[in-house]
Amino acid sequence: MFPVLTEVGGHLEGATLARKVVDLLADRQAEDILLLDIRNVTLFADYFVIASAQTVRQMQALCDAVNSELSKDDITPYGREGEPASGWVLLDLGDVIVHIFGPDERHFYDLEGLYREATPVVRIQ
């Protein structure tokens, strides 16, 4: 679906990494996946990947899949915040921040609204 992964300076380039995460989440039935280019909005990252999971179990499975698949490319998150039971998990991949929400939490935090000046790159509903 997306171009072959490219490495820059020993890590996947941000856009390529973000698209890989989008593909991983889509393959595992995440819902309403949104890739936002936030480079013109903030300095702490280049991309947000935002997705929804319907259950705690699905959210845990999505997090595990992202970690497992990225570890094959020697990529490990710099950090993780939240737990599936809380309805929100953040995975910090450096240039890419992955947010996986439960439906109610996604609506409450409204990252799409908060970062409305960001550029949508991909949306899979």
Image (spheres, rainbow, N blue to C red):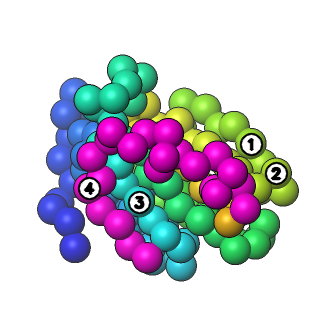
Q: CA distance from mark 4 to mark 2?
A: 28 Å
Q: Which quarter of the image is occupied by the N terminus?
A: bottom left
Residue kind at label 2, given as amino acid type:
Ser
Residue 124, x across and y down, in percent: 38, 72
Residue kind at label 4, given as amino acid type:
Val
Q: Which residues are magenta?
A: 104-125
Asked whether residue 107 is in view, the answer is: yes
Residues packed near mark 4 inside 10 Å, few (<14), some (14 to 19) or many (20 plus) = few
Between disc 1 and disc 4, the foreground one is 4
Q: CA distance from mark 4 to mark 3?
A: 8 Å
Of 10 and 52, which appears nearest the observer? 52
Q: Which disc, if any, is residue 82?
A: 1
**SS class, disc 2:** helix
Q: Which disc, if any, is residue 20?
A: none
3 with respect to 33 (left or right): left
Name the residue carrying label 3: 34
Name the residue carrying label 2: 86
Q: CA distance from mark 2 to mark 3?
A: 21 Å
Residue at the image point whose x is 30% and y is 53% from the top: 120
Between disc 3 and disc 1, the foreground one is 3
